[in-house]
Amino acid sequence: MTLLDQFAFDIGEIPFSLRGSWLDLSRVIGLHRSSPEVHLVTHTGGMHPIFRLVPVGVDGAEEPQVIATTATLSWRTGAGEARAVFASGRDIRFRGRGLGMRFVAGDHLTPFTGGYLFEDPVDGALTLTSYESGRRYRFTVVEGSPTTTGVGALGQSSRSIEFGAEGAWEVLVEEIGAAAPRPPGGARGGAPPPRPDVSARFDDLAAARRQEFAQYLDGLHGADIDDGAIKAAYVLWSATVAPAGFVRREAVLMSKHWMDKVWSWDHCFNAIALAGADPRAALDQFLVPFDHQEATGAIPDSVTHSEVLYNFVKPPIHGWAFAQLRRRTGDAYAEAELTSVYEHLSAWTRFWLDHRRRPGHRLPYYQHGNDSGWDNSTTFDAGGVVESPDLASFLILQLRELHELGRRLGRSTLEWEAAEGDLTAALFEELWTGERFVARLATTGEAAPASSLLNCLPIVLGELLPREVADALERRIGEHLTAWGPATEPVGSPEYDDDGYWRGPIWAPSTALIEDGLRRAGRTILADEISARFRALCETSGFAENFDARTGAGLRDRAYSWTAAAYLTLRSDAAQRGARAA
């Protein structure tokens, strides 16, 4: 038995899903809301629990054990077992032997909310319509005979479909639109449409799902796998969705819990993790928000199935990220792809230079902490509209990447060279005190609080930094370091909060950016230490949205893809350094 065959995970921590699906099975049913029972959850139109799955045993049967693997989800007792497997991205097969299952919908139905359960008169299929997701959930019985409650009921009523424990049963549950797609040549002249294809055996579906994930895992790691690598790869794989709604290409959501969006800097870390294994998937992930780029050059704050938000933006780390993609893919992208990226990055850069600089000022500003990605960092305590050193540093790297792409494409680079020189001079003349970087209020020039790790992010400039500046940043980053990695606010700060979001906890993106910058600045000892501590943190506490800097406990969303992505990247890079040193 291989490590993959032995691998199982906690369904309360990581949802059971499939690459390409907008569905999952999970105990997490909303923002910081969990249930003791597994639910069928959709992320179409938002996160919505559709059915509560209640195992049904014979009288006196013990509580089932729930076991999640990369291929199947199982409920087991001494008397029997029920299992689930994805038949495709939009449907799930369930079956039971000695253990039944009750699919329980909500009991509240109004003209605008809830679910309506009915029997389709065309073929007798039980179907639930959901106001919340705007989709239907159709049951095709493969084996057994269900009992129902609330079929056709309006208003307040119990609604359920139950397969008993006494006999064998199997059912396909599909998420559909107004009608289920069927092969050509279906119903004619009032004849019932053909049933969905349920010819594939349950065990064959499970074997196919296992093989798909095994191939994905092998692309990321090869033979170098352990439980941490499998778990991280599964978080990334299972958070991936097919194009649908406003998502125009395959994309990795931040999570298939409540953080079910692509935010416009989070996606960069997922793209970097995919680059070595699948350059095309990495490029798609990189370009997701650029599919909704405005005429001003701005890209949205976030994109998901049914909304695109422009009320904030995110930091311009995209030049840094695409340089990483080029390096990690061995410059795999064709001229047409480079041209597309160049045009997107050009417009995105001009947005900051044209629309986010106060007249007469050389430095761009954030309008709110959310624009920086560090929503509530102490840097913004004196006011959100700040000229921040991280922003200038990211744009300097983006201008350098535009220069490189322009050179390769035969474009004039004079605009980018001039902007880089001006921005670099302004960064050091206006935000460097001689001891540290500070942010300044765009309206008054007053220095903002400077205790946040955010103020250390100019380390991303790496080899471009003067030695004395790199030395000072290395010391300040060291002051943030705990046993688990760099805290976003020093543990000794009066503003530190164990679960303070960007006011203390350790995060994957800040860790990845700092580790990379330190390494390029020649500070490899500290970079190695930060990498090792963060990898140990993930192997101990999983792939949470962020972590308590003192205890290492996972916080908030517990299956966050950029955390898994940063871990995979740091792990791969460490392995390559070890191989070179051997």
Image (cartoon, helix red, strand yellow):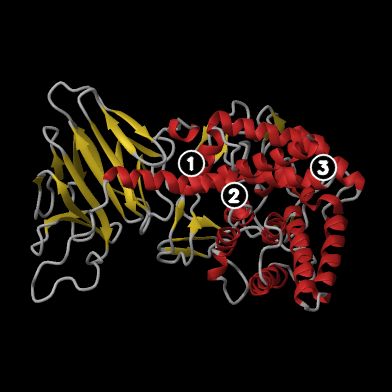
Direction from residue 445 to residue 298 in the image, left or right: left
Image spot of residue 344 (x, y percent): 64, 71
SS for tag 1? loop
Vertical relation: 343 (above or below) 11: below
Compute the Cα span from label 1 to label 3: 31 Å
Q: Quadrant of the C terminus?
A: top right
Relative vertical location of residue 6 with respect to residue 328 in this rendering, above or below: above
Apparent side of residue 471 relative to residue 141 in the rendered image (left or right): right
Instruction: Specify the label residue 375 is tagged with.
Output: 2
Q: Is residue 80 above or below residue 379?
A: above
Seen at 16% across and 41% down, the residue is: 169
Identify the mark nearer the N-term, 1 or 3: 3
Residue 368 position in % (x across, y down): 62, 56
Whole-number angstrom distance, CA of label 3 to CA of label 2: 22 Å
Amino acid at circle 1: Ala
Crowd class of label 2 (few under 14; some 14 to 19; many from 20; radius 10 Å): some
* Location of residue 12 (image quadrant): top left
In the rendered image of this protein, does residue 335 appear above or below residue 138?
below
Q: Give, as a three-letter code, the residue at label 3.
A: Leu
Nearer the observer: mark 1 or 3; the answer is 1
Mark 1 vs mark 2: give the one in front. Answer: 1
Q: Earlier in the sequence, mark 1 or mark 2?
A: 2
**Residue type at mark 2?**
Asp
User: Label 1 vs label 2: CA separation?
Assistant: 20 Å
Can you tell which mark lies on residue 559?
1
Whether tag 1 and tag 3 are in contact, CB under 8 A, the answer is: no
Circle 3 residues within 10 Å: few <14, some 14–19, many ≥20: many
Do the CB atoms of the residues marked 1 and 2 lie less than 8 Å apart?
no
The residue that disc 3 covers is: 473
SS for dot 3: helix
Q: Which mark is residue 387?
A: none
Q: Badge 1: few (under 14), some or many (20 or more) residues near its Cα, within 10 Å?
A: many
